[in-house]
Amino acid sequence: MDNPQISIILATIQRSKEIENFLHKLQEQHYKEVEVIIVDQNRDGRLVPIIDLFKDKIPITRITSQPGLSIARNSGLQLSKGEILAFPDDDCWYPPNLLSDIMLSFNLHPDWDGITVTAGSGSGEKSIWKWDQTSGRCSLTNVWQRGISATCFLRRNVIDTIGDFDEELGLGSSRTWQSGEETDYLIRAIQGGFHIEYLPDLKVFHPDSLPDYTEQEIHKAYLSGCGMGHVLRKHSYPLLFSVSTVMRPLFSAVRASMQGDLRKSIYFKAVARGRWEGLTGK
């Protein structure tokens, strides 16, 4: 498509069936003026036969990049043509009306530079994410409960002004800051005066399950905490606000310990430790 309205930049590694599901659901979208840029970080060609299934129905470009989620997204941005940019996770999918609703909202509100929505499992169960229930403009304080990568839709003017994702942040980064790249980007947009609107009634579907508190999950939680702490430090958040983000998981750890759930307690301690180390630059 020469002039797509929406560019979907899908960075992926070590997933196949999830990519097929995403493309299948995208094919069912009511809104069709899209392009998909798949940034493939696999070392093999596992995605080629999947892309071949859809390439005659959806405009798809496949490129490769070095490891790192932010690196991959930046590679995709260079090729994108759309007026609206989206950054789905490689295990999420869109309900059929989502892109139509997004475009309608942008058309009705030309002053909105971006839209964030919520994520859920698609099963109707309560999400593990602590989403803000009130719609409105994103600010430096509420942005933490109003957007993740998969739920962000930004106009081209935001991308042209803010530039690339911070490649030291996000999964696959060479640093311990294995999260926060999307929050960092939204913060930079807000600081730049852009209007990012939060619409909690719209949803992206995403696997949504409680952690099983294995060693792997605990380490992942620590690294994610490091990312959040670093973003707070990078943008010089007020001390009280920053410390409160460390104390909340500590309270959860104490509560879990009192309930006899030691693995859960260890998990939340790892979150708090990661946030503290990211915040203090350790």
Image (cartoon, rainbow, N blue to C red):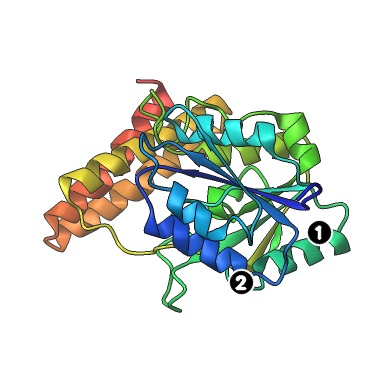
Tell me the SS state at disc 2. Answer: loop
The x, y position of residue 10, in whole percent, is 54, 47
Q: Nearer the viewer, mark 1 or mark 2?
A: 2
At 71% from the left and 55% from the top, the residue drawn is 34
Neighbourhood count class around disc 1 (C-alpha, 10 Å): few under 14, some 14–19, many 20 upward: many
The x, y position of residue 260, in whole percent, is 11, 61
Tell me the SS state at disc 1. Answer: helix
Q: Are marks 1 and 2 in contact (CB under 8 Å)?
A: no
Q: Is residue 249 left or right of residue 85?
A: left
Circle 2 sits on which residue?
28
At 65% from the left and 35% from the top, the residue drawn is 77
Picture layout, residue 107 above or below residue 5: below
Residue at the far bottom in the pictured view: 124
Q: Is residue 217 visible?
A: yes
Name the amino acid type tagged 2: Glu
Residue at the far top in the pictured view: 282
Q: Is residue 174 left or right of residue 39?
A: left
For the residue pair 231 and 141, the one nearer the viewer reads as 231
Q: Is residue 39 left or right of residue 113?
A: left
Name the amino acid type tagged 1: Phe
At 43% from the left and 73% from the top, the residue drawn is 126
Disc number for residue 152: none
The x, y position of residue 216, in whole percent, is 21, 44
For the residue pair 17 and 120, the one nearer the viewer reads as 17
User: Which mark sits nearer the N-terminus, 1 or 2?
Assistant: 2
For the residue pair 87 and 147, the one nearer the viewer reads as 87
Disc number for residue 106: 1
The x, y position of residue 248, in whole percent, is 37, 49
Q: Quadrant of the C terminus?
A: top left
At 20% from the left and 53% from the top, the residue drawn is 213
